[in-house]
Image (cartoon, helix red, strand yellow):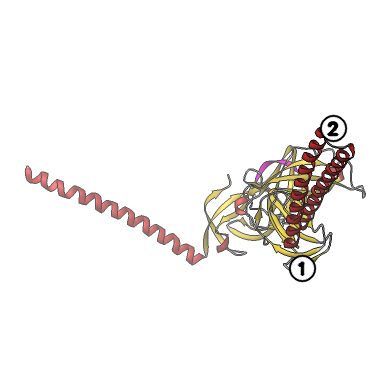
């Protein structure tokens, strides 16, 4: 009895292992057979996606360039030789930062001289004030003549006027110094630098361009026939070359009248850009999401590689693929993108597109987009 138990203890696991090995061998042989058939018959395994009717909100297309809401072209206010340039293109600066200065050393000396003259004039005025107060007091006691008291008062008035003039001269010297310095009116980034040390600037000559890319805007001209459909607060989606994902914007301003040509309406869309990825000057193409929805044929956006408004796909008919160029008729909404030229129910290659060519025979491994 004990021998039977021992035999069963060792034989049972061996049988299980052998059975599992045989099962995996059968599966492997089936897969090898399938691959052999595919190789012999030229069948390519792919994943399919089906064109579906999806609900999309109405859209109003637009194009435009991204512009910083806060942007400024800074120019020289006074003539002078540039003695200091403190920034390079691309530098970030705080509000009030000095970007460049003209004749700075000479003007600093003028300020220092004016400060010294003011201090001297104020000291003389203080002394004249004390002399005048003493003379007026002695006049009441008849210790000095009226003529002497009047002379002290005249000296006091004159020294006070000289102190006021010195104060004005100091203000002018500081004003000339401030005007010789070009400063940042707001925090931002130096987009362009047009001056070099030693260069002589004329009043009004451009020196820097400063932008604050943390908040951008798009100014777009829409067809005038959308005036009844457009209003503030509408959301928009747009794309920029070099970025895979779309960006969001908000319609914040609609012109009170159409342009002079009578056919376009100018609008303004604000774009938050706290991470600074977008830059002023980039071209944007997108759509404003209007009210109401319509059903349109669509494909998953992740499987479409757009070139402008076109994309190339492989339609599957009777397990044969056919290359076809389609038009993308709108921006992505909810992971899907509307297409033109394809009926709902059409099957296209989703994964494995790099393996097929026009006329390839395929076998679907599963389906996507349902």
Q: Residue at x 79, y 43 (%)?
A: 128
| Relative image position of residue 354 (x, y in whole percent) | 57, 62
In which quadrant is the C terminus drawn?
A: top right
Gap in angstroms between the C-alphas marked 1 and 2: 68 Å
Extreme residue toward the bottom, this view: 198
Foreground mark, 1 or 2? 2
Of residues 110 and 344, the one nearer the viewer is 110
Counting residues from the start of the chain, the first of labels 1 and 2 encountered is 2
Query: Is residue 54 found inside the magenta-colored segment of the image?
Result: yes
| Relative image position of residue 82 (x, y in whole percent) | 75, 64
Of residues 200 and 177, the one nearer the viewer is 177
In which quadrant is the N terminus drawn?
A: top left
Residue at the disc numbered 1:
199
**Label 1: element kind:** loop
| Relative image position of residue 40 (x, y in whole percent) | 48, 67
Magenta span: chief secondary structure? strand
**Label 2: element kind:** loop
Question: Across the whole image, how many numbered discs are drawn on residues?
Answer: 2
Crowding near the residue tagged with mark 2, few <14, some 14–19, many ≥20 C-alpha atoms within 10 Å: few
Residue at the disc numbered 2:
142
Over which residues does the magenta segment extend? 52-60
Q: Which mark is residue 130?
A: none
Crowding near the residue tagged with mark 1, few <14, some 14–19, many ≥20 C-alpha atoms within 10 Å: few
The answer to which quarter of the image holds residue 156 is top right
Q: Residue at x 48, y 62 (%)?
A: 38
Q: Residue at x 70, y 55 (%)?
A: 98
């Amino acid at each position: 009895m004990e021998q039977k138990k021992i035999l069963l203890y060792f034989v049972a696991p061996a049988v299980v292992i052998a059975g599992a090995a045989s099962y995996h061998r059968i599966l492997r042989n089936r897969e090898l057979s399938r691959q052999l058939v595919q190789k012999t018959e030229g069948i390519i395994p792919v994943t399919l996606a089906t064109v579906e009717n999806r609900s999309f909100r109405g859209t109003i297309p637009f194009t435009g360039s991204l512009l910083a809401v806060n942007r400024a072209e800074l120019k020289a206010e006074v003539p002078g030789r540039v003695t200091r340039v403190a920034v390079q293109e691309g530098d970030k600066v705080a509000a009030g930062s000095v970007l460049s200065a003209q004749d700075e050393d000479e003007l600093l000396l003028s300020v220092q001289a004016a400060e010294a003259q003011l201090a001297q004039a104020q000291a003389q005025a203080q002394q004249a004030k004390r002399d005048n107060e003493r003379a007026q007091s002695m006049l009441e006691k008849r210790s000095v003549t009226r003529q002497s008291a009047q002379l002290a008062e005249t000296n006091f008035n004159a020294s006070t006027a000289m102190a006021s003039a010195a104060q004005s001269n100091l203000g002018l010297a500081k004003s000339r110094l401030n005007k010789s310095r070009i400063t940042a009116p707001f925090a931002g980034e130096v987009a362009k630098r047009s001056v070099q040390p030693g260069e002589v600037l004329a009043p009004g000559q451009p020196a820097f361009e400063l932008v604050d890319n943390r908040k951008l805007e798009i100014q777009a001209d829409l067809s005038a026939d959308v005036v009844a459909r457009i209003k503030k607060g509408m959301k928009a989606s747009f794309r920029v070359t070099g970025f895979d994902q779309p960006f969001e914007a908000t319609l914040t301003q609609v012109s009170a009248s159409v342009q002079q040509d009578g056919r376009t309406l100018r609008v303004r869309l604000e774009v938050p850009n706290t991470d600074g990825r977008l830059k002023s000057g980039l071209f944007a193409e997108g759509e404003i999401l209007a009210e109401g929805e319509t059903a349109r044929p669509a494909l998953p956006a992740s499987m479409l590689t757009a070139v402008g408004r076109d994309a190339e796909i492989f339609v599957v008919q009777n397990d044969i693929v056919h290359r076809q160029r389609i038009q993308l008729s709108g921006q992505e909404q909810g992971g899907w993108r509307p297409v033109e030229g394809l009926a709902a129910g059409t099957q296209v290659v989703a994964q494995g597109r790099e393996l097929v060519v026009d006329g390839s025979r395929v076998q679907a491994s599963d389906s996507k987009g349902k």
